[in-house]
Amino acid sequence: MPIASGLFKQVAYKIETTFGTAPGQASGQQLRRVQSTLDLNKDTYQSNELRPDLQVADYRHGVRRVAGKISGELSCKTYADFFAAAFKRDFTAGASTAGAGITIAGTGPYTLTRAAGSYLTDGFKVGDVIRLSVGTFNAANINKNLLITGLTATVATVIVLNASAMVAEGPVTGATVAVAGKKTFVPTSGHTDKSVAVEHWYSDLVQSELFLGNKIDKVSVALPPTGMATVDFDLMGQDLADTATKRGGVATTAQYYTTPTTVTTTGTLASVNGVVRVGGVAVATITGMSLEIDPTFSGDPVVGSNTVPNLFPGRVVVTGQFTAYFDGPTMRDAFVNESEIDLVAAFTADNTAAADFIAFVVPRLKLGGAAKNDGENGLVQTFPFQALLNVNGGTGVATEKTTISIQDAQA
């Protein structure tokens, strides 16, 4: 009799059309993972009867729930659907402008000055990673990842993510400036409420488990100073589809998602490749960073059903922490003075000028501490933070009206 091996287990998913109902079998997506621990859990009830035989005579199963975690190494496109579900907004194309006249100046950071039109009206934001394309740009300027660090109507101040040099020139006419890939953020209205059906296919056992009604209950991103960037998605779900009726007549010995799309092939991100800016200043002494996005779903049982009817969304709470060598009073004083600052972190898959990347922007946060360690090595401060709604952001200004945004070069 075969024993299941994790190496032969395949994980695939698809967005549900109706919460808790298996989607069509076509167009599933295989998922890269470090591990997936989804499983069916049940409430249990032990009888409290007082009996003359002094023993427990009954024990029952109650409400069914799915719970577990999908853990992976952070890469472009791979987890875009999961981030979008947690943020309650689909990824969409960012801002762009075509036919512009662009003059490049500076020695790093650089300025991209446009002859006409407005970056702000077009929808560009601080923290966007943009690329110049079209137009007769010098080879040192075209198709590079440029992080916007400052923005007015006509001037975008940028740094190059891989720190390569640009060349002053211009005006270059007929140019295109565009946000690379797609973005999403926690919106102020029009929130989505998506659920996914996740399959565990044990090919060595020829067994399938399809978990229905899963919503992203928490996202944890870890960016260590060495090693791969990682992400954990805590899932809360409704049920395991273990009957032919729920599975559209497909037996559990058949793979549910027929011919799913193979796993993504984008490179894994490492924290050593990229840029981190806190309070508008590049910080080269950060020793680690983490982010937690918590959509706080809840679901209560109802009489006459062994599953919860829905999982209801709460506030999206964003917290995090970064550690940095104690090299001056700036960050400490931001905590002491309860200053509001921002955080921009962009990480790439390699060191090339147009590498795949994922960028996180927290436009408004407050630090919750600035504790320092002690010892023979460099002293390290720990800065927990609470992200807040950027009430002054929005249309026509340089920042997004949100708590957090994410940009994915391949989404």
Image: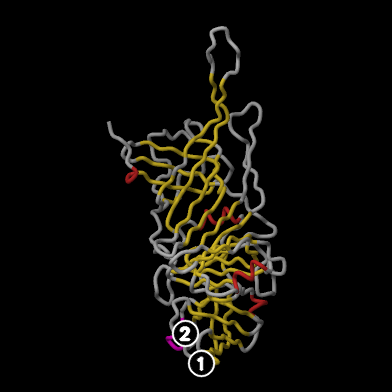
Q: Residue at x 59, y 87 (%)?
A: 113
Residue at screen point 43% across, 67% down: 377
Q: Is residue 187 above or below residue 198?
A: below
Horizontal side of 357 relative to 149 (left or right) equals left
Coloring applied to the structure: secondary structure
Q: Nearer the viewer, residue 290 or 99?
A: 290
Residue lying farthest to the top in this orientation? 52
Corner quadrant of residue 368? bottom right
Image location of residue 92, percent across then percent down:
57, 64
Name the residue type under label 2. Asn
Which image quadrant is residue 139 in?
bottom left
Count numbered badges in the picture.
2
SS of the residue under disc 1: strand
Above or below residue 351? Residue 249 is above
Q: Which numbered marker is on residue 141?
A: 2
Image location of residue 110, percent across then percent down: 53, 85
In depth, the one of 207 and 42 nearer the eye is 42
- Mark 1 sits on what residue? 169
Which numbered dot is residue 322? none
242 part of magenta stretch: no
Q: Earlier in the sequence, mark 1 or mark 2?
A: 2
